[in-house]
Amino acid sequence: MQGSSFPTHARAADLRRVANLVLDAVHNTEGPRRIGRLRVIHPAHLSASADRLALVDARVVSRQHADGGSYRPVVMNETGTLSLMVNEEDHLRIQCILPGLQPMTALQMAQEFDSFLGSKIGYARTDNYGYLTSSLANVGTGLRLSVMLHLAGLAFLGEAIPALTAAAELRISVRGLFGEGTRAFGDIFQVSNETTIGFSEKEITSRIRAAAEHLISREREARRELAAERKDELDEAVEQAGTRLTEARAVSGREAIECLSMLRLGDSLGLGAGLPTKAFNELLVAAELGVSAAGGRTMENVGSDVKRAKLIRNKLAEERNAVQLAFPEAAEQEP
C-alpha cells in the first residue's frame, strides 16, 4: 500500500493503520457479485493455537500469518473460496482457491476483488515495474498462480521427478502441499509461475494451465499403465495403506498423508479399498495433516497422533458404511 513500510519492517502503528484501512473498506460490505458477503477473522484473537492452525490447514492463512501477532486480520467470503491476508509478507495478499482446473476463473475472481479493494485503497505501483512487493520475485503483476496436482500414479512408477523436472525447465516452480518452503508429501505437488514480471496475467495463466494439463496427461497415462500391468501390486499397496490407517492407534501427519494418498489413487482406479476424493480432501483439512508435515512441528503443538488416528479411523468406517448402504449386495459378497 502507498505510504507504508512493508510488514516485515513496519512498526506496530503502521500495521494498525493498514489493518484499519482494510477493515474500513470491507466493513458491512458485499464484495463483487461472484464473491458475495465478506467477513473478518482475527487469528491473533483466537485463544487456542489449534484454531489458528486449522486456518492454515484450510489454506485460509499461511503459517507465517497465523503466528504473526496483532493487526493481521483475514477477510474472506462466506464460501471460503476467496480470502485476503492483511500484513503478511505484503500488506495485502488476495487468494482465490477453486476445485478442479479453473485458473482463469480464479484469476478473474481475484481481479474483481482487487478492483473492488483498489477503488478504496491506494496500491504502491510504478509504470515501469508494476506492483511493488516485499519480495522481488513478486514484483510486476504480483500474481502467483498455482495448481495442486495428485501425481500418485507417476510416483508409483518412479516417473514423477522426471515429469516435474521437465516442467521446471519451462520456468515453472514445483512446491509441496502447503506452498513455498514445504516438501511434497503424499505425492501432492503445487506447480506455479516462477516470475511475475515480464508477463501479463493471461500469459502466466496460459503457461500454468499448459504445464498442468501436460502433467495431468502424464498422470492419466501412468494410471492406465498401473491398471493394465501392475494392478495386483497396486492393489496390495492400497490394502496395506488402508490396513495401516484402520488399525493404527497413533499416526504422524506425514504417514497419514502418504497412506491417504495411496487410498485416493486406489479409488480413482476402482479398487474397493480406496478413498473418495471428497473424503480425502476433508481429512486433509480436519486431521491437521499439513501443519504437521509442512511445519516440522512436534505433535504436542499441533494435536495428538492418537486423536488424528482416531479421526481417520472414524472417517474410513463412515465411508465403508456408506458403501454398504448404497450397495448392500456387494457387502454380502465380501468374505
Image (cartoon, rainbow, N blue to C red):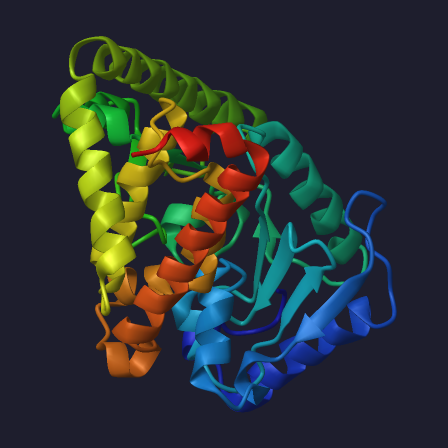
Q: Can you give x and y, in whole percent of width and height, for residue 289 in the image? A: 34, 61
Task: Name above or below for residue 269 compared with residue 294.
Answer: above
Task: Name above or below for residue 48 compared with residue 28.
Answer: below
Give me the residue at 57% from left, 40% from top: 325
Give me the residue at 56% from left, 31% from top: 103
- Quadrant position of residue 298: bottom left
Q: Can you give x and y, in whole percent of width and height, for residue 179 in the image? A: 36, 51
Q: How many marks?
A: 0
Mark yes or no: residue 67 visible: yes
Q: Nearer the viewer, residue 203 or 178?
A: 178
Q: Nearer the viewer, residue 149 or 310?
A: 310
Q: Where, quadrant-wise, is the N terminus in this rendering?
A: bottom right
Q: Where, quadrant-wise, is the C terminus in this rendering?
A: top left
Task: Name above or below for residue 252 compared with residue 128.
Answer: below
Q: Can you give x and y, in whole percent of width and height, for residue 296 in the image? A: 21, 68
Q: Can you give x and y, in whole percent of width and height, for residue 290 in the image? A: 34, 59
Give me the residue at 70% from left, 72% from top: 40
- Quadrant position of residue 119: bottom right
Mark yes or no: residue 194 visible: no
